[in-house]
Image: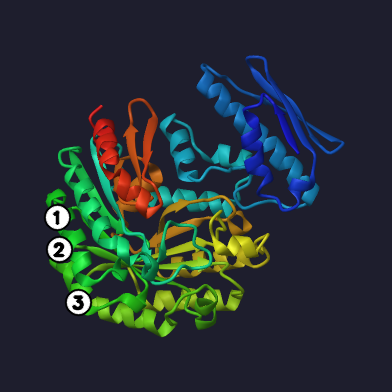
Amino acid sequence: MLTASPAFLVQELGEVARLFPGAEALEISLTQTFDGDTFSGTLWLNDTPFSYSHEGKAENELIYKSLARRYSKLALYNALAAHFQTRLPWGALTGIRPTRLARGELEKGRDFLPLFHEMDVSEDNTALVSRVLRAQEGLYEKREGNCDLYVSLPFCPTRCVYCSFVTAPIDKTRKFIPAYLECLKRELEGAEGLWRNLRSVYIGGGTPFALETEELRAVLEAVKPLRTNGCEYTVEAGRPDVFTAEKLALCREYGVTRICINAQSFSDRTLEAIGRRHTAAQVEEAFSLARPYGFLTNCDLIAGLTGETLEEFCMSIDKAIALSPDNITVHTLCLKKGARLKEEVERLREGEMGEMIAYAREQLTRAGYEPYYLYRQKYMAGAHENTGWCKKGTASVYNIDVMEETADNFAVGAGAVTKKVFLNEGRIERIGSPKDLPTYLEKTQKLIEEKRALFTK
């Protein structure tokens, strides 16, 4: 049980408690006050009190709540770390974008290092944030009218056991594809004239290459009128068992500049366990097939997959580096509501996660890759993070814009979330499309109207 005064701190404290296995069995209560100069309070873990005090100035309600949340989370983190005799790699930080917190400090003329030290972020992770900020130089941009376009194709050959996305096996959803492609076309036609500068296009999923070649052509044709300035153009091609030379040539024909080959692991045992129908050898074949077309390539890996050992994960890192993609994204397994694996596993193992992440960082750095974006999610194994690594000059504009939330994101299709960023007001408005395919098809016209209204405010 968790209680707090003021009451708005309950959610923040819950985010911290979730990081510690066993915390749900504790009685946690907190009372915090602010006298205009100092935030002070007492936290109780069962019958044990922990008192704290921090100086702080709050010129307005927004700053007051921000500091109140920060100091209450830090108090609970310190208490639970002492109770369970463990420290976490990101300390008391619970937000999904540590780099935004760091940039916030820098924009106020302050170094972010003291804040990260106060929140008990590890030295390695603090250094990681610094490296990401450096890698984003020249691409990070906050300017009204910038926009990225996202197209959702929620179709996959099979559903992975860890997946919480809207995707479903394509043999069960194929009947919706003709109507779905028509609705995508209508949404894209409705987007005409809604932005000044399109920074990137990203066609994601799902597994876009799960579509037949002519179905994929219909999507690329619908996008074509909107991509007028030669911007970055990504197709998350996906699993190697649906790769064909015909689909790769089609992407080249329409000006696609980068593709994603989602390996997840190079262990055949792991691939079978997570519900994949391809082998590690097919991943290598997909890279060979794609190489003559000249795309920038990304390879995704996941640390902490079902039963995978440290040795198997390290082998996957080594194999990915040997294939020499331009980007390698290292995800930490995250069990969200809706993933079949979440129903089978109560707690993620934490023992080897730190070693997996440390090995990935060391080997990728040694191979000449730099971290250029990172984000965190709830229920991540070992409270780690997802990090995108790139060779020099190959960072993805789309990934930077989305993770840093510096540009509008016009998103079409089922499960897509459109974001309008009001930079001068420091706020974001969102419109989420229905995840269910029949519901999305039914509400397409309403979505078109809502998005046009949002982008013409």
Query: Tag 2 or tag 1, which sits nearer the N-term?
Result: 1
Pointers 1 and 2 in contact (C-beta within 8 Å): yes
Instruction: Give the answer, above or below, for where 56 lies relative to 287.
Output: above
Name the amino acid, label 1: Lys
Name the amino acid, label 2: Tyr
Name the spot of residue 315 as percent of width and height, x first: 51, 79
Q: Which mark is residue 338?
A: none
Q: CA distance from mark 3 to mark 2?
A: 13 Å
Name the spot of residue 187 as percent of width and height, x first: 23, 46
The residue indicated by pointer 3 is 246
Pointers 3 and 1 in contact (C-beta within 8 Å): no
Query: Tag 2 or tag 3, which sits nearer the N-term?
Result: 3
Q: Horizontally, is 319 left or right of 213 in the view?
A: right
- Work out whether residue 83 can be spotted: yes
SS at mark 3 in the image: helix
Q: CA distance from mark 3 to mark 1?
A: 19 Å
Instruction: Give the answer, above or below, for where 224 lies relative to 254.
Output: above
Give me the residue at 63% from left, 14% from top. Answer: 36
Q: Which mark is residue 254?
A: 2
The residue indicated by pointer 1 is 224
Q: CA distance from mark 1 to mark 2?
A: 7 Å
- Work out whether residue 368 can be spotted: no
Give me the residue at 17% from left, 73% from top. Answer: 249
Q: Quadrant of residue 358?
A: bottom right
Name the spot of residue 133 as percent of width and height, x first: 41, 47
| Residue 269 or residue 52, whichever sits in front | 269
